[in-house]
Amino acid sequence: MFDYIDSDINEIIFQCMGNISLTGVSGRVSFTSGADPDRIVQIERIQGNARQTVGFYRQDKNPKYFEWIKGAIKWKDNVIPRDSTLITYEEKEIPISLYVIMTLLASLGICLAISFLVFNVLYRNHRYVKLSSPNINNVLLVGCVVCYSTVFFKTTGAESDGICKMSLMCFSLGFTVTYGSLFFKTWRVYRIFKNKQLMKRIIKDYQLLSIIGVFVGVVLVVLIVWESVGPHKIVTKYLQKEVYMIGDDTEVRPFVRVCQSEFSNNFQWPLYVVEGGLLIFGAFLAWETKNVKIKALNDSREIGFCIYNVVILSAVGLTLSLLLKDNEILMYGITSGFLVIGTLVTQAVIFVPKILAVKKKDTGKKSTGVTIISTEHTSTSVQSTIYSAQRRLLNHK
């Protein structure tokens, strides 16, 4: 038991140090009596085949430090070599060209939807337009505009959590409104023409709008609960597969900022099931009503084409999103492209025939033979037309 302030112990330590003589990594090491333990250590480096003093280690200073001679050290090619790999981080963002192209296409789609909406309002009493449920078509166009709005929210490189929430909200609600409208229009035709007992079935627009509202409400509740339990936040995602090296032993680690929720799997799949079931059932109804020939009653063939189109795009888009979950930028391009194409095809297929029909009548061309029918105020004569058409269809089968 001793203290270093004990003078006797100090004497013993110095005596032992004076007797030390050993071979170290740089040669013989020994201590002589009277040596200064706080001496200055000279640092030399071989440069130009000769020893050059480049600095000193000052043990006499407090705190101890290296005192380098300015300009004494000469490096090859004037480049200081690294003693370890330098790690740098690089954020990958959506290319501005890709974003501009997608937003321009979405903007054109929105303008086209507004044009169709104006047409639908101005010609709502035209027999061809009126027979296709203009009220439901207006709702469909609103859903298209909401779908297009999704493209404007970049979830990769987002600046705030609000962008994540708005993107999810626009896509889910826009999809449900747009294709829910198509589905329930087809469902009304199915109910009329599959009524084998020839019982009167009058399904008005407000009833269809109520059903659409129920589906939208279900999706909205799921989204609200989702954001309450596990809100979307911006997180940094490192792309391990894209790490690369550059000169001078520098390792670059790319990363992206993406929207993420702790409970994504718990809420995404219920939404997929609801909206996927809507599409699959809509495809079934479109198939069942494919033989309806009377355009006065519906545009079921156009609706069927739209539903088949979006089913294929949704299936391919979902598959690619699962396969490309580590490539956020490519996934943005694919999903945005599918969204714009699917929505554009839907509104074009539904409304272009109506515009052409109105133009034919206005230019005095031959009428398309459309029978007048109103979904809101169905007259007895029109109902007779429906049921006689139904009988002919059933007899044909």
Image (cartoon, rainbow, N blue to C red):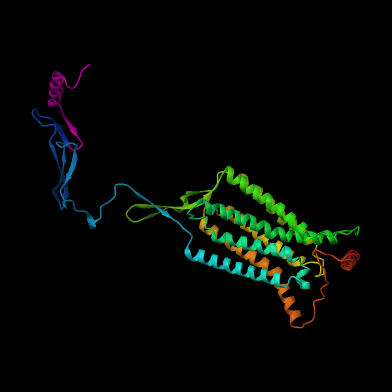
Magenta extent: 1-26
Query: Where does residue 305 sit, x and y in percent of width and height?
Result: 72, 65
| Left or right relative to 250: residue 57 | left
Residue furthest to the left in view is: 34
Query: Where does residue 343 sit, x and y in percent of width and height?
Result: 64, 64
Question: Where is 347 relative to 67, above or below?
Answer: below
| Left or right relative to 297: residue 122 | left
Residue at 73% from the left image edge and 64% from the top image edge: 135
Residue 36 falls in image quadrant = top left
Residue at 58% from the left image edge and 46% from the top image edge: 227
Q: Nearer the viewer, residue 263 or 20?
A: 263
| Residue 134 seen | yes
Q: Is residue 13 magenta?
A: yes
Question: Where is 39 relative to 216, above or below?
Answer: above
Image quadrant holding the N terminus, namely: top left
Q: Nearer the viewer, residue 118 or 260?
A: 118
Query: Where does residue 308 sit, x and y in percent of width and height?
Result: 71, 62
Residue 4 falls in image quadrant = top left
| Residue 338 seen | no
Question: Where is 239 relative to 4, above or below?
Answer: below
Question: Where is 170 relative to 265, above or below?
Answer: below
Q: Is residue 370 magenta?
A: no
| Left or right relative to 231: residue 295 | right
Residue 290 falls in image quadrant = bottom right
